[in-house]
Each structure stands twice: as structure tokens, then as C-alpha cells.
Image (spheres, rainbow, N blue to C red):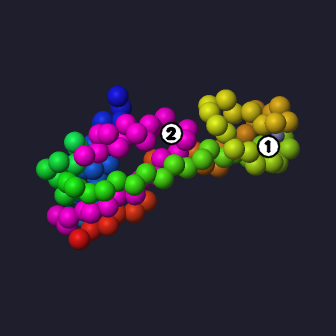
């Protein structure tokens, strides 16, 4: 379960940036193709946040759809899984989004 290590890293990173301030809210962006399961992160968050500046903070997860542009027909498509194929049959795609894993916003007291 790599979400546990990941969540620990995110929390440690945020705690370091806020330099002792109390964090009340964290907004995370998770891309559909990032391989990260939002529910697992949510599950780990409270446990990992205990005893840090993020203890008791609310977690908001924004899922980013996976989008790509087809190099063959130039259309923009939305991908639902790892099978990246345009409706024109081309697999020659350039990813636009979907691999994100980042902290978008942090609210401190
Ligand atoms: Zn295409």
C-alpha cells in the first residue's frame, strides 16, 4: 500500500512548509492515471496527521480527469484507464493531465 508512504510524505512536506502553523485544511489534486487511490489516501490521512501540524485538518481531494491530445487527428480525448487509444485508432497521444499528485491548497490558522 504505497498510499501510506505517500500520505506520510505529503504531510511531512506540508508540515515543514507551514513552519509550526496549525493546518486546518488541505486540498490535494490526484490524477486519474497517477495510480493513487483517493480513498486510500483519505484513509491514511488522519492516522498520519496525528501528532503533526496537520492533526485534525480536513482533507479535500480533487480528482483530475486524464486527458490527452491525439497526434494523428488532433482531437482531445478523455481517458478512463491506462489503455490510451483515440477513437481514430491511434495510440500516438500526448498526455495533458491525469498524472498529477500535488498539494493545491493549504489553509492555516
Ligand atoms: Zn485520433
**Residue 47 percent location from the top left of the image:** 22, 42
Q: Characterize the local packing of mark 1: few (<14), some (14-19) or many (20 or more) Cα atoms within 10 angstroms.
A: some
Q: How many residues crowd around disc 2 within 10 Å: few (fewer than 14), some, or many (20 or more)?
A: some
In x, y percent, where is residue 22?
20, 64
Please give the label number shown on residue 93: none
Q: Quadrant of the N terminus?
A: top left
In the rendered image, residue 52, in percent from the top left (x then y), is placed at 17, 53
Q: Could you tell me which residue is drawn at 69 percent across and 33 percent down? A: 84
Nearest to the observer: residue 11 or residue 38: 38
Does residue 45 show up magenta in the picture? Answer: yes
In terms of depth relative to the viewer, which is nearer, 80 or 33? 80
Determine if the C-beta at disc 1 is less than 8 A from ligand 1: yes
Mark 1 and mark 2 lie on one chain; the one further toward the N terminus is: 2
When asked about the image quadrant of residue 109, the answer is bottom left
Left or right, 15 with respect to 101, comes to left
| Residue at disc 2, CB closer than 8 Å to ligand 1 | no
The region drawn magenta spans 20-46
Q: Is residue 100 above or below residue 89?
A: below
Which residue is the site of mark 2?
Answer: 34
Left or right for 33, reference 93: left
- Residue 23 visible within the image: yes
Point out which mark residue 71 bears.
1
Of tags 1 and 2, the one toward the viewer is 2
Label 2 near label 1: C-beta < 8 Å?
A: no
**Residue shown at 79% from the left, 43% from the top:** 71
Write down which quadrant ligand 1 falls in.
top right
From the viewer's perspective, is 96 left or right of 88?
left
Q: Quadrant of residue 58?
A: bottom left
Q: Residue drawn at (62%, 33%), measured in percent from left and top?
A: 81
Amino acid at each position: 500500500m504505497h498510499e501510506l508512504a505517500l500520505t506520510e510524505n505529503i504531510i511531512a512536506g506540508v508540515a515543514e512548509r507551514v513552519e509550526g502553523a496549525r493546518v486546518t485544511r488541505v486540498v490535494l489534486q490526484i490524477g486519474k492515471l497517477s495510480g493513487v487511490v483517493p480513498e486510500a489516501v483519505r484513509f491514511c490521512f488522519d492516522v498520519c496527521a496525528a501528532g503533526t501540524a496537520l492533526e485534525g485538518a480536513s482533507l479535500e481531494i480533487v480528482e483530475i480527469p486524464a486527458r490527452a491530445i491525439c497526434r494523428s487527428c488532433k482531437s482531445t480525448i478523455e481517458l478512463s484507464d491506462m489503455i490510451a487509444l483515440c477513437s481514430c485508432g491511434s495510440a500516438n497521444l500526448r498526455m495533458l493531465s491525469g498524472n498529477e499528485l500535488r498539494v493545491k491548497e493549504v489553509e492555516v490558522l
